[in-house]
Image (tube, grey):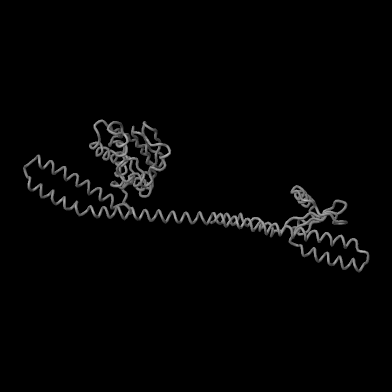
Amino acid sequence: MGLIIVFITIFYSNYLASQLAKNEENKVKLMVELIKSTLKADTNTNLNADQAFALSYMESTNNIPFILEDEQGGLDGNNYPESKINDQEFLKSRKELFLKSGKEPIVGIGYASKVYYENSRLYKLITYFPIVQGLLLIAFIGLGYFFFSASRKGEQNRVWAGMAKETAHQLGTPISAIMAWIDLLKEMNVGKEDQLEIISELSNDVDRLELIADRFSKIGSTPKLVPVNIYSELDVCMKYMERRASKKVSFQYPAADTKALNVNINKHLFDWVIENLIRNSLDAMGAVGTVTAEVKEEGNYIVIDMSDTGKGIPSNKQRTVFEPGFTTKKRGWGLGLSLAKRIIEDYHSGKIFVKNSKINEGTTFSIRMPKA
């Protein structure tokens, strides 16, 4: 619809401009004819009357710039700025511009042997109007799209945040019940070491469920950030995931006792990101491979490179892996990396991106966050 409006405007403006140009040309021609008749007048009466009418008509063309050239080549400007009317260099440049445009001067006599004219300011404004309108229309459409896109994204974020909080709320009741049952089982199996060991593992899994529920509850809220040594936190995530990975997968992480390098993070949410990246690496590698983490300092930022030796990500999909719903797995909702991006960029003022990836060689994700 916008394009149709622009085309109609261009067509109509061109029509008006062409009619105005013809009208202005006719005005200048009529003025030249009046000058001719004035100079050819036989009697003083006719001369005075014709001169008065010619001057009056010339005044009516005050919106049309024109140059009168006499028989000796002298130039006289009309309807130009006061400082330019007698500027011969300026008038010569306007004359040359007129001739370069392919127009022919109107031939007269005497002090108006040749007349060079330009179109009025009104003509130029009508000519430029479609361009101005087109730019305004593009700006309006762009602004509308920006606000619509921002509104839609905000609505999606509210839906995801509400869904996450409701999930955390719904998990709360069964977790509390399971914890009560575990306490009862402990009382019923006092002295039975083998049973207590199983109950202890169940308790650990319930603690994990509580952690997951807490993570979901923080989505959509502003989390509290505290300074944490990034090396020790990576070590915690690595050890947790290492116990759940194949024995043929090796983890190469910096030592936890490496010099302290503090970053302001929310431990629960940050751990979620690292675990998501490791879990994706394990899925990409199958049961064999290497997961590596490398920490670097770059000015006031720290950079964590998470690498694997998996199947890699095609280059045409590296920009879309963080979009909600994107997944190459048969199971899952494709929200892991989307949530990871939100946690790092919205909550920790950092950046996360695919640093490099090669098919059947591996992938490196890079996380960049400000130091504490």
Front residue of 13/135: it is 13
- Count of marks overlaid on the render: 0
Residue at 78% x, 64% y: name it: 59
Where residue 286 appears, as percent x and y from the top left, is 29, 34
- Quarter of image, res 370: top left
Residue at 31% x, 52% y: name it: 219
Is 242 on the left-hand or right-hand side of 67? left
Where residue 330 appears, as percent x and y from the top left, is 31, 41
Is 300 on the left-hand or right-hand side of 44? left
Residue at 78% x, 52% y: name it: 91
Where residue 362 appears, as percent x and y from the top left, is 36, 33
Front residue of 334/355: it is 334
Where residue 174 appears, as percent x and y from the top left, is 19, 52
- Quarter of image, res 134: bottom right
Against 320, residue 113 (above or below) is: below
- For the C terminus, give its image quadrant: top left
Is 21 on the left-hand or right-hand side of 349? right
Residue at 83% x, 59% y: name it: 32
Against 256, residue 92 (above or below) is: below
Q: Is residue 221 visible?
A: no
Q: Is residue 319 visible?
A: yes
